[in-house]
Image (cartoon, rainbow, N blue to C red):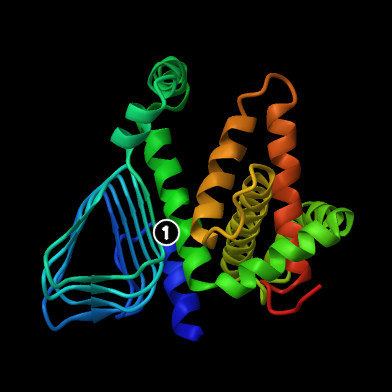
Amino acid sequence: MTKKIFFLVASLFLIATSAHAKDLVRLGRGAVINEGETVDHVVVIGGDLDVKGIVKDDTVIIGGNLNVASTGQVLGDTVVVLGKINKEFGSIVSENVVELSAGKWFHKKGWILPFAGVCAIPAAGMIGLAGLIAVSGFFALFLLIAILFMNRVGNVSFYAQKHFWKSLLAGLISLLLVVPATLFLIVSIIGLPLVPLLFILISAATLFGFTAMSQLIGLKFFSAIKKPNKPMVVEVIAGFIIIGLIAFIPIIGWSIKFIIWLTGLGGAIATKFGTSKA
């Protein structure tokens, strides 16, 4: 668990390498798992993943292809978004696979392409390249948290659903206490070294809570369309997209997103990062 926490903290600073020797993360470039090599979790955004060795747990690829050689094995849950899975004869890929290929969706649903084109123009202007990179980075972190701390994310999500007002209040109180707590630590001098730790904890709680809320919203979405029991990473992806779209609602969009953020923050703090159940 200590190694995983170190891995998460390193990810907070967008280091595109894994802090755990058996976890693999790549942002903006591809990755190769060579024959005889074994890794646990893999997240690749903006590149292909070539597997000649073994992936024991979850694999998430966004904007790239999964290429599995004859000697390759992908044994955990597999999610490929805006890409496809290519398997050589003799390769092994788990049956629990979610493949969302842009070509398939555009072919089957002709309305998606014009809609995406209309939305992309204002979105690109509002977000810009730097914003897109930032969004991609946070998206990668949310997926990492969902993969590495699946049970804990579920606990925070369940708590936020069952105790919505408590979670919201806890998040609001935590937000209001950040400034006075920081000032107190600075004034006390002896607590000065704890200021960076405080902000790391708040940042980690924010990311953890937002991941849980994305999962909860994704869970509700798939239940509403009568397609439940999706892998958690898929629920997080769906929830992240829905929350992003909510922000575009005039006047109230950002207010709703702020409430979601506060609720997730409060849920993460109230459950001690999901270590205690509701």
Tally of numbered discs: 1
| Camera-side residue of 132 and 237 | 237
Q: Is residue 208 above or below residue 194?
A: above
Q: Dot 1: within a 10 Å radius of its alpha carbon, few (fewer than 14), some, or many (20 or more) residues? A: few
Would residue 84 be seen by someone viewing this image from the given angle? Answer: yes
Q: Is residue 214 above or below residue 11?
A: above
Answer with the quarter of the image where residue 198 lies.
Answer: bottom right
Q: Position of residue 207 (x, y in %)?
A: 58, 57
Residue at horizontal 50 percent and vertical 49 percent from the top? 237
Q: Is residue 118 above or below residue 159?
A: above
Q: Position of residue 4 (x, y in %)?
A: 46, 78
Relative placement, left or right, of 13 versus 86 is right
Q: Is residue 140 above or below residue 156?
A: above
| Camera-side residue of 104 and 34 | 104
Q: Secondary structure at mark 1?
A: loop
Q: Position of residue 91 (x, y in %)?
A: 17, 71
Q: Which residue is mark 1?
A: 13
| Camera-side residue of 133 and 50 | 50
Would residue 187 be seen by someone viewing this image from the given angle? Answer: no
Residue at horizontal 59 percent and vertical 56 percent from the top? 211
Q: Amino acid at mark 1?
A: Phe
Residue at horizontal 88 percent and vertical 59 percent from the top? 166
Q: Position of residue 221 (x, y in %)?
A: 65, 44
Q: Quadrant of the C terminus?
A: bottom right
Relative placement, left or right, of 89 versus 113 is left
